[in-house]
Image (tube, rainbow, N blue to C red):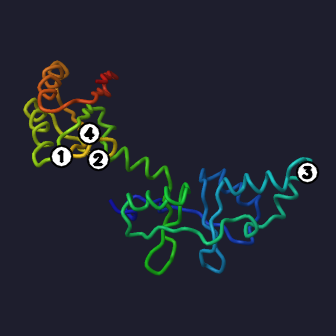
Amino acid sequence: MLVKNWMNKEFYTLNVEDTMWDASRLMKEKGVQMVPVMKKNKLVGVLTDRDLKRASASDATALAIHELLYLLTRIKIEEIMSKNPITVPVDFTVAEAAEVLLHNKISGAPVVDHEGKIVGTIDKDVLFKVLISLTGVEKRGIEFAFRLEDRPGSIKEVCDVIRKYGGRMASILTTYEGVPEGYRRAYIRMYSVERTKVPQIRNELSMKAPMLYMVDHRENKREIY
């Protein structure tokens, strides 16, 4: 899943000569928390809501309202923005972009093409959308979690049980985190199965591999093992 297919293609920018007042108004009206800052059509920084709050706390503490408003119209973006902005290449995968954001402890970043031109932005909201899409949770199906042996065919064995009862796969995700060597966790979401058959499916699946939990999102039922 490439960043270019998920990024925010409609984005807003600020100029270094814009003020804190301009930035505050833009971010509030457009509902964004990170805005690229430009100088002569070149990316020179980013401004986040955290930058605004930090500047307000340090420069405007104990000021009267009229003094605060005056200050907001005088302080330039260039004085409070984060310089040397971290960017994400447009041809990165979403997973690579998430790694960049996590590693640098930032909530979003501009997306740039091969010439360094901004073509979009990516933030935590985009990552949430990707997570929802990958897991298929919107289909309100049933999610099974297993601890499987890390060997060829182990996932197919449990999937065959689900297909046997007419279930369709919405997603299959696996991880090696938090399990002993030689095992992995698998999260399988299915839908289009009769709820009356769920106990039979669960029992047959439990004979194939240790089950960690089952969540029926449509019925809001949860079983933790």
Residue 112, x across and y down, in percent:
48, 72
Q: Is residue 50 above or below residue 36?
A: above
Residue wearing tag 1:
150
Q: Which is more N-terminal, label 1 or label 4?
A: 1
Residue 209, x across and y down, in percent:
16, 33
Query: Relative to the observer, which residue lies in front, 5 or 200?
Result: 200
Q: Residue at x 86, y 49 (%)?
A: 61
**Residue 181 shown left or right of residue 208 in the figure:** right
Label 1, residues with CA under 10 Å away: few <14, some 14-19, many ≥20: some
Q: Residue at x 20, y 21 (%)?
A: 195
Q: Are marks 1 and 2 in contact (CB under 8 Å)?
A: yes
Find the distance from the CA under tag 3 to the CA under tag 1.
66 Å
| Dot 4 amino acid type | Tyr
Q: Nearer the viewer, mark 2 or mark 4?
A: 2
Q: Which is more N-terminal, label 2 or label 3?
A: 3
Toward the front, the furthest residue is 181
> Dot 1: what SS?
loop
Query: What number is the disc on residue 176?
Result: 2
Residue wearing tag 4:
187
**Residue 16 shown left or right of residue 135 in the figure:** right
The C terminus sits in image quarter: top left
Residue 217, x across and y down, in percent:
32, 28
Q: Is residue 178 above or below residue 10?
A: above
Q: Are marks 3 and 4 in contact (CB under 8 Å)?
A: no
Residue wearing tag 3:
66
